[in-house]
Amino acid sequence: MNHSTDETRKGLLYALGCYAIWGLFPLYWYPLNHAPIGADQLLAQRIVWSAAFAVLFLAFSRQKADFFRAWGQPKTIALFAVSAFCIAMNWLIYLWAITNGHVLDASLGYFVSPLFNILLGRLVFGEKLNRRQAAAVVLAVVGILWLAVPVGQIPWVALLLTFSFGLYGLVRKLAPLGALPGLVLETLLMLPFAASYLLYAGRHGGLVFAELNLLQTALLVGSGIATTVPLILFASAARRIPLSTLGVIQYGSPTLQLLLGLVLFGESFDTGRLIGYGWVWLGVALYFSGILQTGKKAV
């Protein structure tokens, strides 16, 4: 096995782990859906705890020199300022969606995001698609359009989730910094804004952290780990595999969310939605068959 193949396989494992965790996120955030806390404070708390745990992970890593070196590189700081803004917007929109009855739009966003990744990979990096892969993308588009049309309105939540996370992945692929030091840099860039907001809320009697029960408090504090680990996996994967491949693997996340919705949360799944998901799954299967065929030829 050559170095390139080994790195690609690592990237695939990182991506699978990342999207498995994100796919199970509804289980994690569900108790907080009923907490007396808005998406704005959830976001601020999530940033604070993510920064704390990311710094802790960095302290025990061998990448501290890379992190401190980045502070002297204005271009690197600028790139991570953009990625920090993108991921903060993504978190805010997602948290708002799940606490304001827009779960359908949020789910749709996670199905559209992989297509946006594939588009970015083609336009920015010139990642080529063969006929089988192109056909897979078309099938996925058909499925997503089928899912989007019944909504009856422009799905702004889905589109904003798509653009924010797609751009985040693009910037992280361009950024000359490893996954962990990059995440620490991002969260530290966001930290002053989050901490200032929480201080402002506390001074004006709007901080509700003390009103949470024990489980909700533990989940909020633990959100630092729950956020840090998959983002490190995602950034590691983005630096090792094509954005187009990363985009297809991302379909595993909303698929897991679908299964959770059906089995645990008892959400309805009518024939129309089944048809739309079926087109998407068919496209994913076709795309992966192309990847497997290419891998066999390379052996």
Image (cartoon, helix red, strand yellow):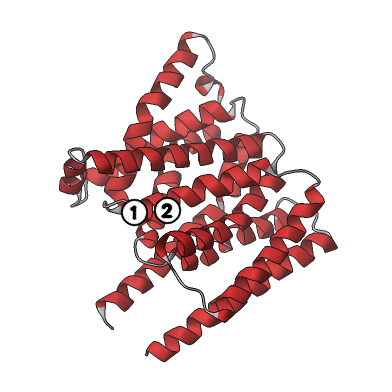
Residue extending farthest to the top is: 204
Instruction: Name the residue at 28% across, 53% down.
Output: 178
Q: Secondary structure at mark 2?
A: helix
Q: Secondary structure at mark 1?
A: helix
* Residue 144 lies in quadrant: bottom right
Nearest to the observer: residue 76 or residue 33: 76
* Residue 77 lies in quadrant: top left
Q: Relative to 20, does residue 135 appear above or below in the rendering?
A: below
**Residue 138 seen anywhere in this rendered image of the structure:** yes
The residue identified by callout 1 is 174
Instruction: Name the residue at 56% across, 45% down.
Output: 28
Instruction: Name the residue at 54% across, 35% down.
Output: 92
Q: CA distance from mark 1 to mark 2?
A: 6 Å
Residue extending farthest to the right is: 271
**Quarter of the image that includes the N terminus:** bottom left
**Quarter of the image that includes the C terminus:** bottom left
- The image shows residue 190 at horizontal and vertical percentages of 38, 32
Q: Relative to 149, does residue 54 appear above or below in the rendering?
A: above
106 left or right of 189 in image: right
Q: Relative to 296, does residue 21 appear above or below in the rendering?
A: above
The residue identified by callout 2 is 170
Q: Does the residue at mark 1 contact the one at mark 2 (Cβ under 8 Å)?
A: yes
215 left or right of 126 in image: right
Please, what is the three-letter code of the amino acid marked with disc 2? Leu
- The image shows residue 161 at horizontal and vertical percentages of 57, 45
- The image shows residue 227 at horizontal and vertical percentages of 44, 45
